[in-house]
Amino acid sequence: MGEQVLTITDERTGKSYKAPITDGTIRAMDLRQIKEDAEDFGIMTYDPAFLNTASCRSSITYIDGDRGILRYRGYPIEELAEKCTFLEVAYLVLNGSLPGESELKEWVHLVKHHTMLHETTKKFLEGFRYDAHPMGMLVSTVAALSTVYPEARHVLDPENRRMQIVRLIAKMPTIAAYTYRHSLGLPYVYPDNDLGYTANFMNMLWKMLEPKYVANPVLSRALSILFILHADHEQNCSTNAMRAVGSSQADPYLSTAAAAAALSGPLHGGANEQVLLMLDEIGSVSRIPEYIDAVKAGKYKLMGFGHRVYKNYDPRARVIKWTAEQVFQVTGRNAKLDIALALEKIALEDEYFIKRKLYPNVDFYSGIIYQAMGFKPDMFTVLFAIPRTVGWLAQWDELMRDPEQKISRPRQIFTGSAERHMPAERPTIGVPVGV
């Protein structure tokens, strides 16, 4: 196949320009050659919210929204959720391949070795108000780790990057659990490195006076599956924030805090809480038709349906739906699940939603599971941040190794006033112009 080229004709000047096509894209800088005259800056693209702009090349996560496909490093998300632990998937996302037996043993040991927080960091957490939002505590504490590990600023050192990555993955569950205990006024529980990643997290959340906390294996596995499903999702809002801040060579703790701050917004990490509020609003299966009519009339939004990327059934939603059934066998069936199942069935059969490609997404069932496990809604985004840290750090490390990447600096289209001047009669209070 010959070279693929896009030919653009500028109707203003009659000139034609060529832009090479690579991987279905042209470089935006190739448009700068299109000018009316030598003084012209050249054509830019205008793309609010980056709806059709690729900002990087990445080998981590592949999404085909039209076909409902999500893969980490080539592996379908369904297979990873079925056959792997979260730390295996974390290793895959970070390194590009699944670990062998000895590699996994070493990796798990390394993560467990770094689960403890420095005691001064624990005191930092204790300084928050009793009613502080867990996500605000998490963001602030992760940023504060930048002062605990000042060597993290040497971001171009691969070995140093690796150490900070391990520390963050190990410490995120500890910070998250401490924010939860803080909200309840309970003493913090130290990590138990005899336990697996999610079981240890549950230990730090829920251990009371028992000598040894034993997590329910079904709930521990369910949490591991949820973590796998949330590990990465390509260039979403928080990942874009991680890359934008990281492009300035800020250290990974500050970059991760920025990504977590982006995640905290209700349009990103807080969507599953909105699903619970919707199910509470519906109240019973019998009220679903009435609610559906109100959605069609524009009075409500159908939360947990539709996605910026997926125009088909979100592959994560299928796995989460199965996981919810397993969880409810342990916790008892929640009425919200019956409402959710009935709502999903009606929506998937209704031409209104089919035409608009509004299929259930990952948020539709995840909030129900978290609530059944005992979490309050204000912890949901924190639970999202723990596994997504893996994806953020993989993307950040990839950014550091990419020779094409520079500091992020989008252009703008200026819409303000043209040049204007201060009134001549206004007195000078500074240095006169020209001096």
Image (spheres, grey):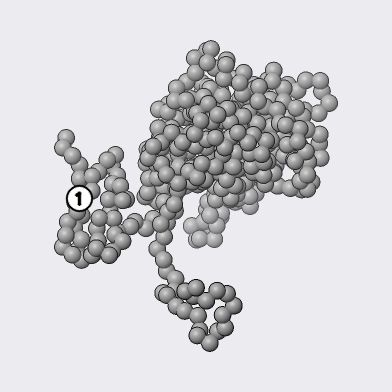
Left of 380 or right of it: where is 183?
right
Extreme residue in the bottom direction: 425
Left of 52 or right of it: where is 292?
right
Q: Please say whether residue 242 is visible from this viewpoint.
A: no
Left of 256 or right of it: where is 76?
left
The amino acid at mark 1 is Lys
- What's the residue at 57%, 83% (across, down)? 427
In the foreground, 111 or 245: 245
Q: Please say whether residue 419 is visible from this viewpoint.
A: yes
Label 1 sits on a secondary structure element that is strand
Residue wearing tag 1 = 18
Q: Is residue 416 above or below residue 31?
A: below
- What's the residue at 33%, 57% (across, down)? 44
Extreme residue in the front direction: 435
- What's the residue at 54%, 42% (across, down)? 250
- The quadrant in which residue 206 appears is top right
